[in-house]
Amino acid sequence: MATGIDISFMQMALNLADEARGMTSPNPTVGAVIVRNGEVIGKGFHRRAGEDHAEVAALKSVEGDAAGADVYVTLEPCCHTGKTGPCTRALIEAGVRKVFVASLDPSEKVNGKGVAELMAAGIEVEVLDGAVAARARMQNEAFRKHAVTGLPFVIFKSAMSMDGKIATVTGDSKGISCEESREMVHRLREEVDAIAVGGDTARVDDPMLTCRIPGARRQPLRVVFDSDAGISPESRLVTTAGEYPTLVFVTGRAEAARRRALESAGVEVVEVGELDGRVDVGEALRHLGSREPAVLSLLLEGGPTLAASFVEAGTIDKVMTFVAPMIIGGKGARTPVEGGGFGVVGEALELHRLKHEKVGSDILLTAYAAKEEW
């Protein structure tokens, strides 16, 4: 039975995992701590795909050996060989006494097999529950969803006034969210695998869709849902495609000449099916989830028509709304989600696990489409 001290060691492992947040895709984020006689003798975390997993990194940090020690790991140790060897074998060979696991790995290659292999080797295993388990699952929510469904974890982000407007009637949207909110969004861009906008937003706003934090460790794949390939070859997204990977989803009605112009600029053009006159977002997500490497997380930034397509398709997992202390007004001013909408309130997309936090002068509301974590 885990004690308060055990929980504190697991919290330490979770904090270690956070150091590589967003850097390990398509692998999960994992931290590990090794303890003997109440003292930490080793610790480590998985830094990026292809490098040592957390357990191995922690074992390598031990001076001497880890025989008889306890290991606290945030995710069930893997038991298969990929770019690195199985962590279960490393733990068994190290002669550890007990392994505390914060969350099981739902992927087909593991899913309880890691725990079973350790126990078969005579190592005691305890799978934790409660707050640390919930934190561990949330830490890898994108990895977990993809492991179960093969689809990316979709985060819908918007910034709006208190009366629900994302722009004025003239289309001006600059300065709705505060500087602290904008910085948080750029940090989120650094963590996700891909960021998406609709064709109208790409044409009107001419965005870069990059993380502009100095020294950013990675940049997301930039994705445009543009049924007729109408994005200008002179746009910043297209002219910088050689520097930042860019993908445009089109339908069969996109003119061949437009497609060739994008491809000649280094843009990857992918044709998918059409649904209600627009790119079939379900098919697009299946493509993203099956790429190599797979896109585990997708940040949906705009605009309201594309957001409506995702809402109506039931493909949004998490909603992050920055609410600014202002009223914009205007019957024609745009809202975060447009489209046809739901006919009755009972059909609306219900959100769960709502929380709020103050970010600068804004309030960030976060909620999920599912009641439970993946």
Image: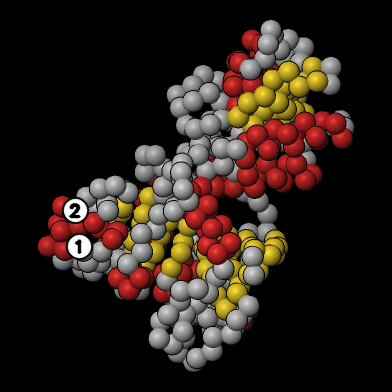
Q: Quadrant of residue 12?
A: top right
Neighbor class of circle 2 (other Cα within 10 Å; few <14, some 14-19, many 20+) is: some
Picture coordinates of residue 101 (x, y %)?
A: 71, 31
Residue 233 has which mark?
A: 1
Q: Is residue 178 left or right of residue 32?
A: left
Toward the viewer: 246 or 207? 207
- Rendered residue at 59%/85% (across/down): 327
Determine whether, in the image, residue 7 is placed left or right of residue 110: right
The label on residue 265 is 2
Residue 99 versus residue 175 in the image, above or below:
above
Mark 1 vs 2: CB contact within 8 A: yes
The residue under the point 46% across, 27% down is: 50
Residue found farthest to the top: 64
Where is residue 40 shown, x and y percent of the image? Answer: 76, 22
Q: Indicate the position of residue 19 as horizontal and vertical percent values.
A: 60, 38
Relative vertical location of residue 266 with respect to residue 318 in this rendering, above or below: above
Which sits in the foreground, 154 or 335?
A: 335
Left or right: residue 228 versus residue 150 is left
Q: Identify which residue is drawn at 63% across, 69% down.
A: 362
Amino acid at the residue labelled 1 = Pro
Q: How is the image coloured?
A: secondary structure
211 vs 203, left or right, is: right
Which quadrant would residue 159 be assigned to in this image? bottom right
Quadrant location, the N terminus? top right
Q: Secondary structure at mark 1?
A: loop
- Dot 1 or dot 2, earlier in sequence: 1
Q: Residue at x 50, y 61 (%)?
A: 315
325 w.r.t. 151: above or below: below
Observer-nearest of 362 and 70: 362
